Image: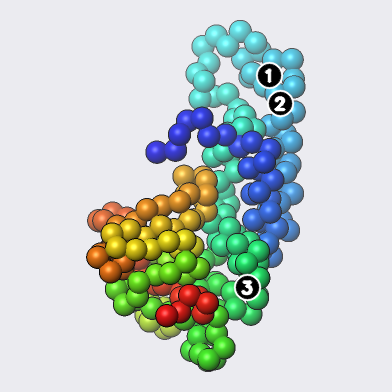
Amino acid sequence: MRPSDIVATPERFARLIEYWSAVPDGGAVVPRLVGLRAALLALQTEPNGGDATGGDGAGTAAAQLPPTPEDIGVYARPAWSAAFISAVARWAGIAESDLPSSSRHASYIDAVLERAITDPERAYFRPHAPEERVPAPGDLLCADRSTTPLMHWSMRLGEIGRPRAMHCDVVVRAGPGVVEAVGGNVEDLVVLRRLPADREGRVLPAPPGEASFVLILAARTAER
């Protein structure tokens, strides 16, 4: 559960705009989010503070009140987890040819897989099944959030270009018993997750009901 005191501070909102500015779709999303925040701020300055009841609040449930600009969940759509990965890749100096900026995880995953197959010697990322590799800092750990998850990452090669709900986190540490990875738009935040691993450090399968880990994109600088 997200702590109730986490709010969309100006600093957090500015960082979200940075994420969206890193992807092509951001050209449409950024002004929409900025406009939404401006409208919510304007409501707060109205005489009744945006209270649709006319000020007395009688007979109106709190759920009927408009959201505040500090409500971090207001900015969770469109989903920005892939924009977060794209921004991190640009900040890390990873070239667009190695991981294209995209607002969809499946889109950049497809491009990375194609590059790994057609140009394996120069590809920045190489694909591995989670059970085959101990992840290292800089790797991407990817899960399949679709209703019919892939049994193995190689199955994606037969459907490249088709929509598929996925999510990737950046691995920051791995060792016996735990893999630590950072992802965006997790409970509307950038979150460090501590995932169970085996004694060698390979991430364990996700519990029933959670998205299945299907792919590790191993960064060339992290290859061992």
Q: Mark 3 or mark 1, which is nearer the start of the sequence?
A: 1
Q: Is residue 55 left or right of residue 193?
A: right
The number of callouts visible is 3
Q: Are marks 2 and 1 in contact (CB under 8 Å)?
A: yes
- Asked whether residue 148 appears in the rendered view, the answer is no
Q: Is residue 181 left or right of residue 211?
A: right
Residue type, mark 2 in image: Leu
**Which is in the foreground here, disc 2 or disc 3?**
3
Residue at label 1? 49
Note whether 18 is above or below 11 in the view shown.
Answer: below
> What is the CA distance from the residue labelled 1 to the residue labelled 3?
46 Å
Quadrant in the picture for the C terminus: bottom left
| Position of 143 relative to 94 (above/below) | above
Report the residue at 65% width, 10% height from top. 55
Amino acid carrying mark 3 in the image:
Ile
Q: CA distance from mark 2 to mark 1?
A: 6 Å
Label 2 with label 3: CB-CB less than 8 Å: no
Residue indicated by mark 2: 43
Indicate the secondary structure of the residue bearing disc 1. loop
